[in-house]
Image: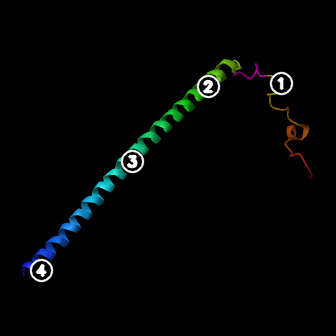
Amino acid sequence: MSRQYKGMQEELLSKVNALEAKILELKDELERSTIAIDELRKEKAQELALKDAEIADQKQKMEVRAPQPAPTSRAARPASLAPPPPTACAARGRRAGPP
């Protein structure tokens, strides 16, 4: 029995040691992954800040270049924006086109 017990004890100790080594390996991998994710987040935050600054710059340029809004009354509209005059057919109540 004592031989069998010692054999089982040695087998279990080797399994424990192998599993502890695996735990250390996985902890190291987790630490490397966490560092990589943190670096990626920093890069993306910098890219986002640059994009936001570019958007703000473009908005500011658009506001500087924007023309003054035109008055909205019908009388003040330029002729190019006025609706076309009614045709003779429309004035008589007929539709334009073939009869």
Q: Residue 71 is drawn in which quadrant?
A: top right
Select label 1 or label 3 by which is in front. Answer: 3
Pick the residue in front: 96 or 55: 55
Q: Is residue 54 left or right of residue 80?
A: left
Residue drawn at the location 28% of the way across and 57% of the way down: 23
- Where residue 9 sits: x, y (%)? 14, 71
Q: Earlier in the sequence, mark 2 or mark 3?
A: 3
Q: Which mark is residue 59?
A: 2
Q: Residue 61 is drawn in which quadrant?
A: top right
Question: Which residue, given by chain and number where applicable, does mark 1 sit on?
Answer: 79
Q: Earlier in the sequence, mark 4 or mark 2?
A: 4
**Amino acid at dot 3:** Arg
**Amino acid at dot 2:** Lys
In this picture, is 17 found above or below 92? below
Q: Residue 87 is drawn in which quadrant?
A: top right
Q: Residue furthest bottom?
A: 1
Q: Is residue 72 left or right of residue 80?
A: left
